[in-house]
Image (cartoon, rainbow, N blue to C red):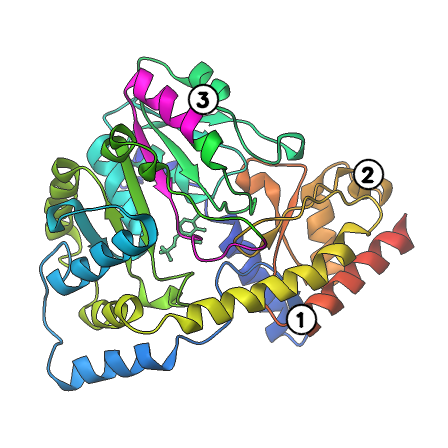
């Protein structure tokens, strides 16, 4: 009969996109809503990258490319990994995909058999569990809260590993947490993965957005063994404000990368050619725009963090990276008359006219996520609205 396949019947829509859509609808009907749901930088793509894309089109570079991406783009990624991570990869160990999201999707499709498990620390990026399930796998959650700075320990990961475990996902800097795993923490996690012989999936999409004294370390840098079992996932979306261009990559085991490239050859053919030329310029061209955006995010964080942290009933750790704040707001929800944070988040949208993402979608039901990828004026106004809503209804 004409029923949907079982694999999509349990698929949840992305909470992030759902709230963003509701806020947009309210805005279009004339309501003055401030959206703090965004998962993308609010800057335009740097000019040199736009020029490179336009030039490539004028030169007639508008045809299919190899499925795994243009050799020149793979080379640009290889050079980036050498400079930033001091890691050596060959072209066979790199695949270019349609954003980090689709790269991850393809990876799960090629490494998971039915009932294989993937360990996912909470709070997590919404798409990890859905992508694992779409590949027939089983997400196994390992919990963290603000008491552990929203990070899981190697021991927690060890306890979650079973004979079915294929991989663990590490996302540092994290979405929605903004937290960064230290070299020592990663070292301990790498040890456990070696001992249990499982893959490490290292989502480093927020690598360039790190604040204060923190430094990015990729778990793949820690030893030869760690490099062999790690898939680095990254791309230009957040670093170069290129979310709509849809270019991401994987670096890792060449047998897996080759299977992914094969799969892509039958599903997508190749990432958009123009976007690949733009990404070559993003990696090979000047990087000052990347640093300027980082500094701008940092100054917003410095301004907005203390204002948010002083709202009654909000408990918030200062993030070290990405562009999200993740306050625990159970106290504020309770004192303003709600039995859970989802309802509180709904009220913030309809009453305070500020769109935030409830943490339940991230496996973190005590929190809400606010993105600071918007202007400082709007951020200050949004925080003011949230504060007065909470104070008036306390
Ligand atoms: N990984 C994380 C943690 C993210 O937050 C995102 C985007 O929101 C992605 C991956 C996907 O990025 P893209 O598909 O735009 O490269």
- Mark sitting earlier along the chain (2/1): 2
Q: Which residue is mark 2?
A: 334
Q: Is residue 1 visible to us here? A: no
The residue mark sitting in front, 3 or 2, is: 3
Categorize mark 1 by other alpha carbons within 10 Å: few (<14), some (14-19), many (20+).
some
CA gap, disc 1 to disc 3? 38 Å
Q: Nearer the viewer, residue 96 or 355?
A: 96
Q: Quadrant of residue 253?
A: top left
Label 2 crowd (10 A; few <14 / some 14-19 / many >=20): some
Residue 126 inside the magenta-drawn segment = no
| Mark 3 in CB contact with mark 2 (< 8 angstroms) | no
Q: Nearer the viewer, residue 286 or 10?
A: 286
Q: Which sits in the foreground, 350 or 91?
A: 91
- The residue depicted at 32 percent of the width and 39 percent of the height is 221
Say which quadrant the N terminus sits in: top left
Residue 160 placement, left or right of 164: right
Q: Does dot 1 land on a helix, a strand or a loop?
A: helix
Cα gap from disc 2 to disc 1, whole angstroms: 29 Å
Span of residues in magenta = 187-212
Element marked by disc 2: helix
* Mark positioned earlier in the residue sequence (1 or 3): 3
Q: Which residue is mark 3?
A: 157
Residue at the image point whose x is 71% and y is 63% from the top: 303
In the image, residue 34 lies at what x, y percent? 66, 67
Considering only order in the chain, which callout, 2 or 3, is on the residue closer to the N terminus? 3
**Relative to 12, is 146 on the left or the right?**
right
Foreground: disc 2 or disc 1: 1
Return the residue at label 1.
376
Q: Position of residue 185 (x, y in %)?
A: 48, 30
């Amino acid at each position: 009969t004409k029923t949907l396949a079982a694999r999509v019947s349990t698929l949840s829509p992305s909470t992030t996109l759902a709230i963003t859509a509701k806020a947009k609808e309210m805005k279009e009907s004339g309501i003055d809503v401030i959206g703090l749901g965004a998962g993308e930088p609010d800057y335009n793509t740097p000019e040199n990258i736009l020029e490179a894309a336009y030039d490539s089109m004028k030169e007639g570079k508008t045809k299919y490319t190899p499925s795994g991406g243009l050799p020149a783009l793979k080379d640009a990624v290889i050079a980036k990994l050498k400079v930033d991570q001091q890691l050596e990869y060959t072209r066979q160990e790199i695949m270019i995909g349609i954003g980090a999201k689709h790269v991850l999707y393809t990876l799960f499709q090629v490494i998971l058999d039915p009932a294989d498990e993937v360990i996912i620390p909470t709070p997590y990026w919404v798409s990890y569990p859905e992508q694992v399930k779409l590949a027939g796998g089983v997400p196994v959650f390992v919990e963290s809260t603000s008491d552990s700075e929203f990070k899981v320990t190697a021991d927690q990961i060890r306890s979650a590993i079973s004979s079915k475990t294929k991989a663990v996902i590490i996302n540092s800097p994290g979405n929605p947490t903004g937290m960064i795993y230290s070299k020592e923490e990663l070292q301990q996690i790498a040890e456990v993965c070696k001992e249990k012989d499982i893959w490490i999936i290292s989502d480093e999409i927020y690598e360039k957005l790190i604040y204060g004294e923190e430094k990015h370390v990729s778990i793949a840098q820690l030893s030869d063994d760690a490099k062999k079992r790690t898939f680095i996932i990254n791309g230009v979306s957040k670093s170069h404000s290129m979310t709509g261009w849809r270019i991401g990559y994987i670096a890792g085991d060449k047998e897996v990368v080759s299977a992914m490239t094969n799969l892509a050859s039958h599903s997508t053919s190749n990432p958009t050619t123009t976007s690949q030329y733009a990404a070559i310029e993003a990696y090979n061209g000047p990087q000052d725009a990347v640093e300027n955006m980082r500094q701008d995010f940092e100054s917003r964080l410095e301004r907005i963090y203390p204002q948010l942290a002083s709202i009654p009933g909000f408990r918030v750790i200062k993030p070290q990276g990405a562009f999200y704040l993740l306050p625990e707001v159970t106290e504020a929800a309770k004192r303003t008359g709600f039995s859970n944070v989802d309802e509180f988040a709904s009220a913030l949208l309809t009453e305070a006219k500020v769109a935030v993402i409830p943490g339940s979608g991230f496996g973190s039901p005590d929190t809400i996520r606010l993105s600071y990828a918007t202007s400082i004026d709007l951020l200050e106004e949004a925080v003011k609205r949230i504060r007065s809503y909470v104070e008036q209804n306390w």
